[in-house]
Structure formats: C-alpha cells, structure tokens
Image (spheres, grey):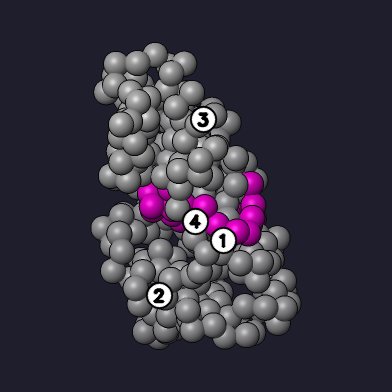
C-alpha cells in the first residue's frame, strides 16, 4: 500500500503528463500541503528521474534524442507556429538580410516573408528555399554541405564555412528544447549545434522561434545561453513557465497570441 507521500507524488507525475508544467502554487492548493512539502516531493521525484525541477515548479522529463522528420513536425502545433511566425515577420524590416535555420517553425516564418523583394534570404533548409523560390525576384542564397533528410537541411563543416561568409541582420533560429531553469537553448546533436553557433556568430540579432512543447523537453547539445540571444518568440502555452523564470530571462521572451 502506498504511503500518503508516495500517492501524492504519483499524482504529481500524472499531472505533469497532462500539463507538462506545474507550478508550486498549483501543487500546494491541489494537495493542501506546504511549499516546503512540495519542494521535498519535487526533489525526490527529480532524483528518481521522473521530472525536472524549474524555478517555481517542475516540467515533465522528455529527452529529445533524435530529430523528428519535417513531414511529421509539419502537422504539430500549426496554430502556435503560425502565430509565432506572424510576430517574427513583424520584426523583419525592409532591407534586412535574413538567415533562416532549417525547421518547420522557421518555414512558417518564410511563408510570411515570401514576396518581400527588399529582403535577402539565406537558408540551410531545403523546404525553406523551395518556399522562397515560389516568388520571382527574391534574393536567395542556399547553404550547401552534407544533406540530411531528417529535417531536409544541409549541415557540417562545408555549411559552416558557407555561413561564415555572410553578414546577417536577423537570424531565425529553431530549437529542439529550451531549458529555462538552466538558461540554455539546445538541439539534438553536436553537428546541428555547430551549424547553429556559426549562424549566431554572423548575425546581429538572433530571434529564436519555439512553441511551448520545446520547453518541456531536454536535448543533448547546447547551442547558446538564453541571455545571449536577442529574443525568444513563443506561444501562450509557455506563459506559466516564463512567469516562473528569473527576471533577467523573462525579458527575453515575446508571447504570440
């Protein structure tokens, strides 16, 4: 028979599976327990590998070990991605050189920017280049390198070398996961991270695009610290996580409604 604490902790894990993030206040009210008891429960569950503690609560532990194909991701969180893309498109001004990282959220941004002939585009994403070339008169540079079918992109040393030839105004950067507690933006592999860091090096302003699901996962390779990018554009599903973040990080987020 489960003890009262074990039963409560099992319910906390189940709640996280439903919501992905829960804050301390919600847990104190739901289980009628003190903040100290909540923190003890979360600490024990984290040690057991069942969740990851964050500032003000906890997130479901979901490690991203492999890239999911673009075909699969295209149907995920479409409403959120479209809202994010609309906000990001408004940050791009006439005359900008825009570097778009391969990925489905950046693809949504490309759809919003296609046809703006005053812009210069660079991308390592095959789907993004295909979208941009639907309209005549665009200035487009396609990054070469080792092709990977998973997210239909080019990567590796040749891609990095190509990217470093440019001086970019805005970078639209995807992320596999964002760890607000540790202040890190991550991706699934060192190869992907290396290309992303090359993109950051040549860009004046880094705009990270990430729907709320990216905040409840972890992944292997660090791309950058949150404090070192310009802004992270996300959707309203991330609000509770952002609200619990340190003040110096909260100012980095823009929520698309």
Nearest the viewer among 214 and 130 is 214
Whether label 4 touches label 1, CB < 8 Å: no
- Asked if residue 167 is positioned above or below residue 14 in the image, the reply reads below
Q: Residue at x 36, y 84 (%)?
A: 134
Number of the front mark, 3 or 2: 3
Q: Residue at x 47, y 79 (%)?
A: 150
Q: Earlier in the sequence, mark 1 or mark 2?
A: 2
Mark 3 and mark 2: Cα distance apart in space: 36 Å
Number of the front mark, 1 or 3: 3
- Mark 2 packing: few (<14 Cα in 10 Å), some, or many (20+)? some
Q: Which mark is residue 70?
A: 2
Mark 2 and mark 4: Cα distance apart in space: 19 Å
Q: Name the image quarter holding the C terminus.
A: top left
Q: Name the image quarter holding the N terminus.
A: top left
Q: Helix, strand or loop at disc 2?
A: helix
Q: Earlier in the sequence, mark 2 or mark 4?
A: 4
**In the rendered structure, which segment of residues is drawn in magenta?**
204-225
Pointer 3: what residue?
43
Mark 1 and mark 3: Cα distance apart in space: 26 Å
Give percent across and percent down for residue 159. 66, 79
Q: Which mark is residue 63?
A: 4
Nearest the viewer among 46 and 157 is 46
Evaluate whether residue 250 shows in this view: no
Quadrant of residue 200 within the rendered picture: bottom right
Number of the front mark, 4 or 1: 4
């Amino acid at each position: 028979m489960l003890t009262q604490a074990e039963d409560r902790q099992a319910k906390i894990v189940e709640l996280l599976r439903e919501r992905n993030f829960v804050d301390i206040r919600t847990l104190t009210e739901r289980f009628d327990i003190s903040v100290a008891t909540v923190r003890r429960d979360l600490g024990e569950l984290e040690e057991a590998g069942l969740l990851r503690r964050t500032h003000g609560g906890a997130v479901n532990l979901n490690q991203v070990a492999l890239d999911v194909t673009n075909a699969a991701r295209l149907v995920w969180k479409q409403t959120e991605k479209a809202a994010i893309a609309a906000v990001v498109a408004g940050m791009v001004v006439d005359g900008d050189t825009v570097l778009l990282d391969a990925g489905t959220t950046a693809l949504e941004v490309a759809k919003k920017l296609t046809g703006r002939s005053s812009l210069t585009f660079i991308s390592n994403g095959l789907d993004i280049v295909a979208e941009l070339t639907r309209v005549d008169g665009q200035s487009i540079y396609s990054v070469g390198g080792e092709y990977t079918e998973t997210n239909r992109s080019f990567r590796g040393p040749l891609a990095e070398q190509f990217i470093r030839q440019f001086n970019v105004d805005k970078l639209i950067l995807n992320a596999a996961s964002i760890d607000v507690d540790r202040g890190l933006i991550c991706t699934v592999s060192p190869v992907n991270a290396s290309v992303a860091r090359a993109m950051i090096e040549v860009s004046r302003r880094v705009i990270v695009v990430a729907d709320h699901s990216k905040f409840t996962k972890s992944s292997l390779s660090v791309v950058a610290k949150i404090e070192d990018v310009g802004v992270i554009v996300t959707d309203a599903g991330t609000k509770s996580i952002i609200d619990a973040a340190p003040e110096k990080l909260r100012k980095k987020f823009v929520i698309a409604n």
